[in-house]
Structures are given as structure tokens and as C-alpha cells.
Amino acid sequence: MTEPESAEDGAVLFDVDGTLMDTVYLHTVCWWEALRQHGHQVTMARIHRGIGMGSDHLLDALLGDDHDHDEDADLSAAHDALYGQFWSRLAPLPGASELLRACAGHGWKVVLASSAKGPEAEVMIRALDAGAAITAVTTADDVSSSKPAPDLVQQALEKAGVPAGRAVFVGDAAWDAKAARKAGVRCLGVLTGGWTRQELTDAGAEAVYESPAELLDRLDGSALAAPPGRD
């Protein structure tokens, strides 16, 4: 990974699951099975709507704030064990790796802001194979509260060494757009996580693209054409 440069540069912050990696529905199935193993019948449709949150918010959303939090660690461990079976087969979305390299080539600091835990994030970074383009990585291990709280976005800004006004966040879920908005960062959306264009726009995304590949194709006409202050 490259080292952070001066604070005069801009940063593009990328969510990873569903934005760069085709993993949203794998997470959905693994949470469904983990919950089922512990006696909770939750539909996949409901689980899918929570993907993109960290497990702290996800379980509250699915089981209620008053559920037995003593089992959260076991539920999370069950999900992680199930999801770990797919690690060797995780794949980037088409155009994702090229998008990271293109953003770096346009002068942006590229920071990955993932709700995944460290080891899982490392697997995805290896799969993306764009390490030279990535300035920094922020994971769930770096923050006390996950998306839609702004902590992950704020930590990514700190690692990039840029203020919120010189950054753009790219995500696939309403939780990404809400977290970015709370942190004062512009947001672009992609549809590869299963959310609708209207939902992402309503949550705060200023523009929405079909996929990382479409954003790459339209990069020069997007908010990622060049960092603020550059021609």
C-alpha cells in the first residue's frame, strides 16, 4: 500500500462488501444459517436489508434491541465460520480492481472502509489485487460503532489525512450513504448490493451507478474525475 501524502489531496473511500466484492448474498445466507442454528427464524429478505451494517447494529435490527445480547458473540462466530468456507472463492465485482487503480491514477488517495473484521478484510484485499493503488484500510476492528454510524468513515478520513470536504464515499447500501452523510462526505452509490436507485438516492447518494464497471466507464464525468482543486 502507498503511504498517505499531503492533506491537500482528496480521498475516495470505498465500502468493500457489495461495492467492490460480490459478497452481499453470501453474507445473507451465512447470517440466515447462523441465526437458524441458534433458534431464530429470520427471512433472508430481512437479513439482506441489514447487510452493510456491522454485526452490532445488524443483530439489533433483526432480533430487536431487547434481544439476549449474551448470544451475540456466538451468532457472530457462527456467521464467521460459515462465511469462512467461501474465503478461497471470494471474487471482486467486474471492474472493481480497475476502478481502484483508475482512481489512484487520477490523483485520489484510495481508502477501503469495510465493516468486515481484519482477517476477512485481508482476504478481500488480496482478491482485489490492487494493493499498489490502496493508501489505507479501515475495518470494524478500528471503530467502536459500525455503519450507519459515521465512525468508519471518519476513521477512513483520518487515515487518508483529508477533511470531509475533500473526500467522496462509494457504497452499495443505504447504510453507506447514511454514514457518509453523517460524516459530511459526498456519496456515490452502486446497485450491486441489491438496493434500488431510489433507496440510495433517498439515503443521500448524489449519483448512482449500475456497478463499479459503469462508474469506471463514466469516471471522467463523475465526482471522481479528479480530486478537489485539481483540473
Image: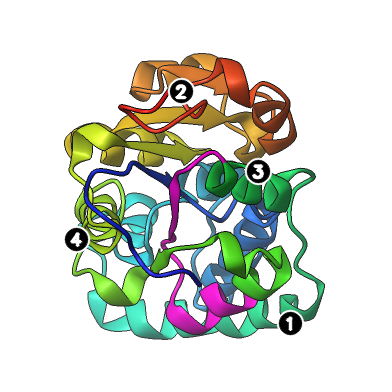
Image coordinates for residue 212, horizontal then vertical, percent: 67, 37
Q: CA distance from mark 1 to mark 3?
A: 27 Å
- Residue type at the position of mark 2: Ala
Picture quadrant where residue 228 is located: top left
Q: Nearer the viewer, mark 4 or mark 2?
A: 2
On the image, numbered disc 3 is attached to which residue? 99
On the image, numbered disc 4 is attached to which residue? 66
Image coordinates for residue 110, horizontal then vertical, percent: 46, 53
Classify residue 90 as left or right of residue 159: right
Q: Nearer the viewer, mark 1 or mark 3?
A: 3
Callout 1 touching callout 3 (CB < 8 Å): no
What numbered label is drawn on residue 85? 1
Task: Write the residue at 25% across / 82% down.
Answer: 70
- Residue type at the position of mark 3: Leu
Q: Secondary structure at mark 4?
A: loop
Q: Start and end of the magenta stretch?
A: 106-123
- Residue type at the position of mark 1: Gln
Task: Write the residue at 61% across / 40% down.
Answer: 193
Picture quadrant where residue 92 is located: bottom right
In the picture, the quarter occupied by the C terminus is top left
Q: Nearer the viewer, mark 4 or mark 3?
A: 3
On the image, numbered disc 2 is attached to which residue? 223
Q: CA distance from mark 4 to mark 1?
A: 31 Å
Whichever of labels 2 and 1 marks the residue nearer the N terminus, that label is 1
Callout 4 touching callout 2 (CB < 8 Å): no
Callout 4 touching callout 1 (CB < 8 Å): no
Picture quadrant where residue 131 is located: bottom right
Q: Secondary structure at mark 3?
A: helix
Classify residue 96 as left or right of residue 223: right
- Residue type at the position of mark 4: Asp
